[in-house]
């Protein structure tokens, strides 16, 4: 049965970036990618890799669960003569229009993220009702549940043959503790300087600040259940 696609995540990333007064170039510098890649992700012309998505959410101080909920608005917030991003200064500061709006707390993203943390997904989620995010190289995250104020990414994760956390081979780091259980297929986990070949029934757990990455070099999809628990919780 097919899972339900959530709205594209680019708009929600853009809303939060603008809400914080961060320019495209500023965010790109922070996570070590090009400004054009950030723009392509925000306009949904490109899908981020797992590692890039974690880098973006870490830089913006939001969680993966915040990206699953419906976007607050389909329209760019706080427009003047163009999209809100055009109001940001080249120096990485914030224009008077954006600053005034932030002080009033009127951006849709600010309201949306508060509501997302209170959102309930469950108590039962049927396969055809799962919300999904499809990332670069066909990596798919399916949300299995969410409890208000309990910030755990509870996901069914699929790596298609040839799929990986990053096409460049870059390892990722993010806050929290990661737990995984591989149901089918095979995955290679790079954890620090070590490589682990995961097969069905294997379980993993580690501090997510340790550089890590996954890749599927087999000819079958690798499917597993993952929990990522935020450190602060």
Image (cartoon, grey):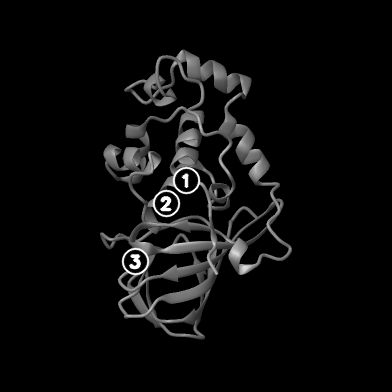
Sequence order check: which comes first, mark 1 or mark 3?
A: 1
The residue positioned 37% from the left and 22% from the top of the image is 86
Residue 175 appears left or right of 113: left
Question: Split into 4 quadrants, where in the image is the N terminus?
Answer: bottom right
Question: Split into 4 quadrants, where in the image is the C terminus?
Answer: bottom right
Callout 2: helix, strand or loop?
helix
Callout 3: helix, strand or loop?
loop
Sequence order check: which comes first, mark 1 or mark 2?
A: 1
- Quarter of the image where one finds residue 27: top left
Q: Residues within 10 Å of mark 2 (few under 14, many from 20)?
A: many
Which of these two is toward me, 138 or 164? Answer: 138
Q: Residue furthest right?
A: 123
The vertical placement of 164 against 63, above or below, is: below
Sequence order check: which comes first, mark 3 or mark 2?
A: 2
Residue 24 appears left or right of 129: left
* Residue 21 % position (x, y): 46, 27
Mark 1 highlights which residue? 9
The vertical placement of 90 against 209, above or below, is: above
* Number of the front mark, 1 or 2: 1
The residue positioned 55% from the left and 16% from the top of the image is 100
The disc at residue 164 is 3
The residue positioned 50% from the left and 36% from the top of the image is 16
* Residue 31 % position (x, y): 35, 45
The disc at residue 53 is 2
Cα distance between the residues tagged 3 and 2: 13 Å
């Amino acid at each position: 049965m097919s899972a339900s696609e959530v709205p594209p995540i680019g708009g929600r990333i853009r809303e939060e970036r603008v809400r914080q007064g961060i320019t495209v170039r500023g965010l790109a510098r922070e996570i070590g990618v090009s400004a054009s890649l950030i723009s392509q992700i925000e306009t949904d012309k490109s899908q981020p890799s797992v590692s890039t998505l974690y880098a973006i959410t870490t830089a913006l101080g939001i969680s993966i669960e915040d990206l699953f909920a419906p976007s607050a608005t389909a329209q760019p917030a706080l427009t003047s003569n163009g999209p809100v991003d055009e109001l940001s200064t080249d120096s990485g500061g914030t224009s008077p229009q954006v600053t005034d709006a932030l002080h009033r707390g009127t951006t849709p993203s600010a309201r949306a993220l508060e509501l997302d943390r209170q959102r309930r997904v469950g108590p039962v989620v049927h396969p055809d009702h799962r919300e999904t995010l499809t990332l670069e190289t066909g990596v798919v995250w399916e949300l299995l549940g969410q409890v208000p104020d309990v910030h755990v990414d509870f996901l069914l994760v699929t790596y298609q043959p040839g799929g990986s956390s990053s096409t460049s081979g870059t390892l990722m780091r993010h806050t929290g503790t990661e737990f995984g259980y591989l149901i089918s297929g095979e995955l290679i986990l790079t954890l620090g300087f070590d490589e682990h070949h995961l097969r069905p029934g294997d379980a993993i757990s580690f501090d997510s600040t340790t550089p890590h990455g996954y890749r599927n070099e087999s000819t079958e999809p690798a499917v597993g259940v993952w929990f990522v628990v935020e450190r602060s919780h």
